[in-house]
Amino acid sequence: MTPSPSRKAWRESQAAKTKIKPSKRGKVRFVPLNAVVDGGWLGSLSLRELRVWLVLHRMADKNGNLHASHCTIAARAGMRREHAARTTAQLERRGLLRVRVRGRTVGSQGKRTANEYEMLAPPFMNSASSSTIAEVK
């Protein structure tokens, strides 16, 4: 059922009064996701790589940066910590992710703090260059 013309006009006037603007975050957020699907990466990623990439994509801010430990990634992706660590390294080798290991250790067990990640807008499968999400804006 479509709204009546008067109802539609009322909604548009209310939107104009409140100055609703489309979010830029929503547009930028889908750039890497579209690149993975449209660029031919979807079929070449393993299920584990895809799960970790989606978790990291969900956790990233509007510029594609995030801080997360392997334990956090593993818990959200439903896998063991060792698999999350191995998979983030695989994604970095593929050019979908940039990892900055933070060197400070916590406690007597030598556990590291959360790593810093930068999501990269993946290149098309036949292209060799990659750019960050901030550059795509």
Image: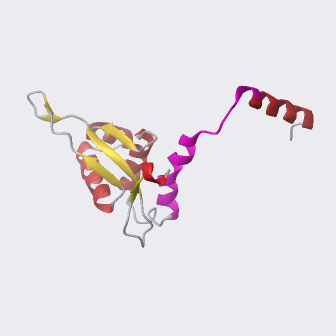
Relative depth, front residue between 38 and 1 = 38
Residue 1 in view: no
The residue at the far bottom in this view is 126
Relative depth, front residue between 103 and 20 = 20
| Magenta stretch: helix, strand or loop mostly | helix
Relative depth, front residue between 30 and 91 = 30
Which residue is at a point 64% across and 39% down the rendered structure image? 22
Residue 49 is left or right of residue 108, and the answer is right
Image coordinates for residue 38, horizontal then vertical, percent: 52, 63
Question: Can residue 109 be found in the magenta stretch?
Answer: no
Residue 115: image quadrant is top left
Display coloring: secondary structure
Image coordinates for residue 77, horizontal then vertical, percent: 37, 43
Residue 96 is left or right of residue 40, and the answer is left
Which residue is at a point 85% across and 30% down the rendered structure image? 10
Question: Can residue 23 be found in the magenta stretch?
Answer: yes
Residue 13 in view: yes
Which residue is at a point 80% across and 34% down the rendered structure image? 12
Image coordinates for residue 11, horizontal then vertical, percent: 81, 31
Residue 43 is left or right of residue 113, and the answer is right
- Give, as a single range, the part of the protein colored magenta: 17-38
Residue 129 vertical placement versus 21 (above, below): below
Image coordinates for residue 81, horizontal then vertical, percent: 25, 43
Residue 71 vertical placement versus 92 (above, below): above
Image quarter where the N terminus lies is top right
Which residue is at a point 34% across and 47% down the rendered structure image? 118
Residue 47: image quadrant is bottom left
The mark total stands at: 0
